[in-house]
Image (tube, helix red, strand yellow):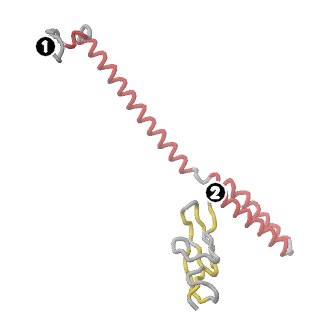
Amino acid sequence: MTHDPAGPADDTPDHAAAGPAPDQGDLEARLRDAEDRLMRSQAELENFRKRSQRELDEARRYREIDLLRDLLPVLDNVERAIAAAARSTDVESLLSGFRLTGKQIEKVLLIHGCKPIETDGQPFDPTVHEAILQQPVAGTAPGTVVGVAAKGDRLHDRVVRPAQGIVSTEA
């Protein structure tokens, strides 16, 4: 007796074993249902895209609102200091008020991720420093920032403005 790997011979078609074949009407109903689901999915996707674009546009339009909320009280203090300067001749208290306002601005910048670029005594780095002058400085390695004309700032990892500095050369 030989074994047939295909199994016993059967003259019945494969789809007959699965049950009765669906009729034409049932197939058309299933097709309409699938087309309807496809159309609904496409409409939902399009609505999602439009909603996402609106939200992105709104986020871009109002992205500075937190910074403005933090800066407006600083502006109020500046305006109060200007009004006080018009009424007072006490230069020291005015200077103290402006120092406090400067510290307040620095704090707001730090809160929003804006940090000063290190300069004095640092090796010159053209990605964050701009050399405005070179001069020999005794006891300092060439290529070292020895003075700052204007401080630089970065927002996270991006330079907002480079620090302008004086760079040492060989004596």
| Residue 165 in sight | yes
- Tag 1 residue: 2
Query: Which amino acid type is shown beneath numbered disc 1?
Result: Thr
- Quarter of the view holding residue 167: bottom right
- Tag 2 residue: 112
Question: Is 111 placed left or right of 169 in the picture?
Answer: right
Q: Which residue lies furthest to the front in this view?
A: 1
**Above/below status of 19 relative to 102:** above
**Residue 130, horizontal then vertical, whole percent:** 55, 77
Q: Alpha-carbon distance for marks 2 and 1?
A: 83 Å
If you read the primary sequence from the N terminus, does the residue marked by circle 2 or circle 1 appear first? Answer: 1
Q: Quadrant of the N terminus?
A: top left
Label 1 SS:
loop
Task: Find residue 36 and name its label.
Answer: none
Q: Residue at x 56, y 89 (%)?
A: 170
**Residue 125, horizontal then vertical, whole percent:** 54, 74
Query: Which amino acid type is shown beneath numbered disc 2?
Result: His
Nearer to the camera, 69 or 28: 28
**Residue 153, horizontal then vertical, whole percent:** 60, 67
Q: Nearer the viewer, mark 2 or mark 1?
A: 1
Marks 2,1: beta carbons within 8 A: no
Label 2 SS:
loop
Q: How many marks?
A: 2
Count residues near mark 1 (Cα–Cα under 10 Å), then give few for <14, some for 14-19, many for 20+: few
Nearer to the camera, 152 or 40: 152
**Above/below status of 17 relative to 104:** above
**Residue 53, horizontal then vertical, whole percent:** 47, 43
Count residues near mark 2 (Cα–Cα under 10 Å), then give few for <14, some for 14-19, many for 20+: some
Q: Which residue is drawn at 58% across and 85% down?
A: 168
Question: Is 2 placed left or right of 21 in the picture?
Answer: left
Nearer to the camera, 67 or 23: 23
